[in-house]
Each structure stands twice: as structure tokens, then as C-alpha cells.
Amino acid sequence: RRTHLPHEEQREKNIRLVTEVALDCFLANGIEKTKVADIALRSGLTERSVFRYFETKADLVLAASLLYWNRILERIDRMSHAASGGGTTGLQDAENVLICYSQLYHLDPNGMRFTLDAELTLHTAGRLHEIKNQPPEPFETSGGPMAKAIRKGLADGSISPDVDVREIYYNSYDAILGIMQRLAERERTRLRQPDAQPEPDVRARAQRQITTYTADPEPSGFVYTHLCQFG
């Protein structure tokens, strides 16, 4: 005998299912090539049912973006924690976080392309500001790995209180994620070209030092240098 969930519980379950399926489809096929009918079919629902939960495709893209960034923040938190090995300063943790972000192009190129496509789609729909969990979140309220590393550094003295930590926070995210998105988009463009040849390892070709944190003998006590050189 089948057990029927209460209406609201079933609704929430279906919304989660559709969001997860939509993200899978967007990652595999891109936003433009994914139809709501495809998402409905894979979810075991009718297209009309999907539109009861999400009024427009942009709503689906927004929900999928929020889900994607939740997963990324959790993943980076785990990766940076594993890389630190314990006993690290906040400054070292911040460096580890950025190194982990720099690996996203290799670990999740489809995800990086999705974030760029989602930004364009939501910007066109006037909804980009609604991705509230996309790095960088507001520093004051962020519980993300970079914000936690900076607060730890301020507490343990490895980051000077005289430094504008908000500028470092926002600029580091803008730089690292922008680079990953550009690399992913460049690879997609290359693959669309006839007779495309395999691209050399991006790490070897890019020859980059994505982030370097160094102690500064000047009163500021801290210098953030962002270096990126494409070959």
C-alpha cells in the first residue's frame, strides 16, 4: 500500500528533486540547450507540474545556482580543511582556500561554465543579485571558508588588523573565480572549433601564481599579491 506524503511535504520534495535534476541537466548540456520539458521528463513529472513550482526557466536557473554554490562552499571547506592538516594560521588557511578554488577548473570545468552561463541568464532576467550564496557573500555575514580564515587570522595575529580585510576578501574571490570562468569558457570555445586539437595542461601553460600572501615589514603588516600570467 502506497503512503502519500502530506501535500506541503510532497511539494518540497518535488522542488528539491526538480532543482537537482535541473542542475544535472545544466551541467551536462548547458542552460541554453536544456529545455524545461527535459527536466520534467527526468524528474518523472509533467512540464506543467514543473511550472507550478518554478514560474520561469530563470527561476530554475536561480534555484540550481543556489544549490551549486552550496555544494561548492561545502566542498572547498572540506578541501581546505584537509589541506591545512591542523595547526595552521588564519593566513595559511586563506592561502589554502584560494588554492582549492584554483583547482575547480580541473575538478569541475562544467560547473565553472555553468556559473558563467547562469550569471548571464540571470543578469538578462534581472535576477543576478538573488544568488546570495555565490562567493563573495557579504563579508560581515559570510560563513564561507575564506571569511572564516580571515577571522581566524585576525584572531591569531597572522593577519594585521590594520589591513582592509574586506578588500582582500572581495578582490581574491573576484580574481580567482573570474580566472576559472574564463579558462572554462576558453576551453568551450576551443572545442566548438573544427579540428580542435587537445589543449596542453592549463597549469603548465598558464604558469601562474594565483595567490601569494607574504608578511610585510611595513606597518600595514600584510601584503596581498595577485599574479596571473597566461602563456
Image: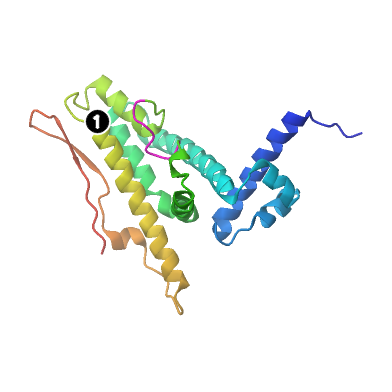
Q: Is residue 131 visible?
A: no
Residue at point 47%, 39% (across, down):
130
Residue at point 27%, 32% (across, down):
166
Q: Is residue 151 left or right of residue 134?
A: left
Under mark 1, the amino acid is: Val
| Mark 1: secondary structure | helix
Residue 217 among those drawn in magenta: no
Residue at point 67%, 41% (across, down):
53
In which quadrant is the C terminus drawn?
bottom left
In which quadrant is the N terminus drawn?
top right
Residue at point 60%, 48% (across, down):
56
- Look at the image and give the residue range highlighted in magenta: 133-140
In the image, residue 61 sits, relative to residue 77, either above or below, namely below
- Image coordinates of residue 63 in percent, x first then y, are 56, 42
- Give the class, few, some or many, for how many residues have Cα within 10 Å of label 1's Cα (few <14, many ≥20): some
| Helix, strand or loop: magenta stretch | loop
- Image coordinates of residue 147 in percent, x first then y, are 35, 30
Question: What residue is pinned by disc 1?
Answer: 165
Number of marks in picture? 1
Q: Is residue 191 visible?
A: yes
Colour mapping used in the image: rainbow
**Which residue reaches farthest bottom?**
195
In the image, residue 216 sits, relative to residue 194, either above or below, namely above
Residue 136 among those drawn in magenta: yes
